[in-house]
Amino acid sequence: MELKEIERQLKKQEAVAKNLEPDANLRSSWLNAVNDYAEGFLEEIDHRKAFETNSEEDAQKTQFNIPDEGSGIQEIIRQLEDVVDRPGLNPASGGHLGYIPGGGVYPSALGDYLAAVFNKYAGIFYAGPGPVKLENSMIRFMCRLVGFPESALGNLTSGGSVATLIAVTTARDKMQIQPEDIRKSVIYLTEQVHHSADKAVRIAGLEYAVIRRIPVDSHFRMDAELLDEQITADVQMDLKPFLIIASAGTTDTGAIDPLDKIAEITEKHKLWMHTDAAYGGFFMLSERLKPRFKGIERSDSITIDPHKGLFLPYGTGAVLIKDVPALSRSHFYTANYMQDKTETPAEPSPADLSPELTKHFRGLRMWLPLKLFGLNAFKAAAEEKQLLALYFREKVKALGFELGPEPDLSVTVYRYVPSGRDANAFNKALVECVKRDGRVFISSTLIHGQVWLRLALLSFRTHRQTIDTALEVLQQSVVLLSDGKDCC
Ligand SMILES: *Cc1c(COP(=O)(O)O)cnc(C)c1O
């Protein structure tokens, strides 16, 4: 191309490309429109359904096509409302009492907004000293919470699953599991462990390792004595035990394994102990509940999810690891084009401690709410959630429901046993009835072949009033079903 032609083309393309930089007026009109919508959403949240059914037809109709020319913000927001915001589960609702409820504290949205506007690079200290330091501070805050030493660190991940993958990978390398050892290597966990642990094991190339599911006691906690016996037996069989995955708050029942005893056994046999505290970890903010986690500080690695117990929006998990050199050995890499990095930075870089290089600056969405609200509000909310579980149990028992074991945290199971009818079918129908009503959302689980209803409390928007509504819906549903009626 000749220079003249290049210049002509440049002028033409630049004029259109500059659309990517809206002026102040346009920026503020977009921001106002988005803010108006967000405000409408937040003002309404306490009255909105926790679950809205959507038809297959509506789902089919939905199209996210990309136009060649831009569209107006109002039209786009309307589409978002219809097809993204409304249908399905509303995880931001305090009425979400199923699975593990979601959060979404408001300042996180502002943190994300700022992170996206200034787009700081949070992967490497040399390029983004501020963001890296901020993220490491958040990780150290969590390390202190669980009782890890100052030398520990980890990584802010997209969630608990990736956090566990990082931990399992580090354990594999630190324990020197060579490819030829895999079939003789042994991993210990319980049937109650979150499936993300099994997934991490498989992705880390350990699918063919020996997996021992240690039986649980009547509270769904790992039986530490059987664990010890199994490890001893495995060693005698010339196998290579190397990893124990304990849970500090199982998803199904909120159970905390006997961490102190497990740590004892881990140390005796010189294994790696990983504790999955994705759901439960932030209950350590409560002085009353903290003793239940005794022994967690003896873990080698921990998964903890700020997008659960710290009520952040989805996309923020964390792995905490004591042996930072081991974490780095499994994840460090360097490339020619990055040779300008300083040799010994003052702060370790996330890129050296995780699979990611360029990453979302997650720290800001965590730091901003902690800074604006202060820690006490989070402590009270954790405390409140657990008290609500106890409150619910008293009340639902009075309605004639059967209770599962006393919960360690804020997940509790219960079921209705009708006389002369199939309890499993009845409880499944109950879930449907509650879903139909929509004011609250609950889920169920299968324990030893029995259908149990679960109440999981982890939304900062769930308060006593929400639980009273849940009890009312359950009571009405039982009456309807007992009369042989159908809720649907
Ligand atoms: C949610 C959860 C996970 C998985 O975490 P994600 O953030 O969803 O990837 C792992 N373990 C437990 C106990 C959980 O509750």
Image (spheres, rainbow, N blue to C red):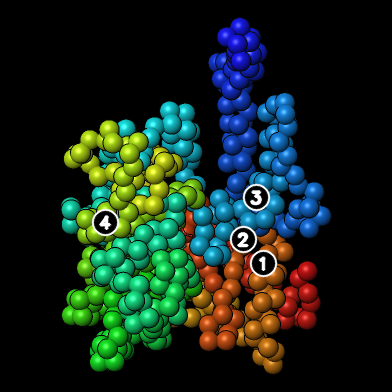
Q: Secondary structure at mark 4?
A: helix
Lower position in the chain sequence, tag 2 or tag 1:
1
Mark 3 close to ligand 1, CB under 8 Å: no
Q: In this rendering, is residue 184 above or below 103?
A: below
Lower position in the chain sequence, tag 4 or tag 3:
3
Q: Badge 4 is on which residue?
A: 329
Disc number placed over residue 48 in the picture, else none: 3
Disc 2 from disc 1: Cα separation: 7 Å
The location of residue 58, given as percent across then percent down, is 79, 51
Q: Nearer the viewer, mark 4 or mark 1?
A: 4
Q: Which residue is drawn at the image coordinates 68% and 64% (left, top)? A: 435
Answer with left or right where residue 275 lies relative to residue 311.
Answer: left
Disc 2 from disc 3: Cα separation: 10 Å
Is the residue under label 1 in contact with that under label 2 (CB below 8 Å)?
yes
Badge 3 crowding class, 10 Å Cα cut-off, few under 14, some 14 to 19, many 20 or more, is some
- Relative to the observer, which residue lies in front, 353 or 262? 353
- Relative to the observer, which residue lies in front, 375 or 305? 305
Q: Secondary structure at mark 3?
A: loop
Disc 4 from disc 1: Cα separation: 50 Å
Outermost residue, top direction? 4
Q: Nearer the viewer, mark 2 or mark 4?
A: 4
Viewport quadrant of the C terminus: bottom right
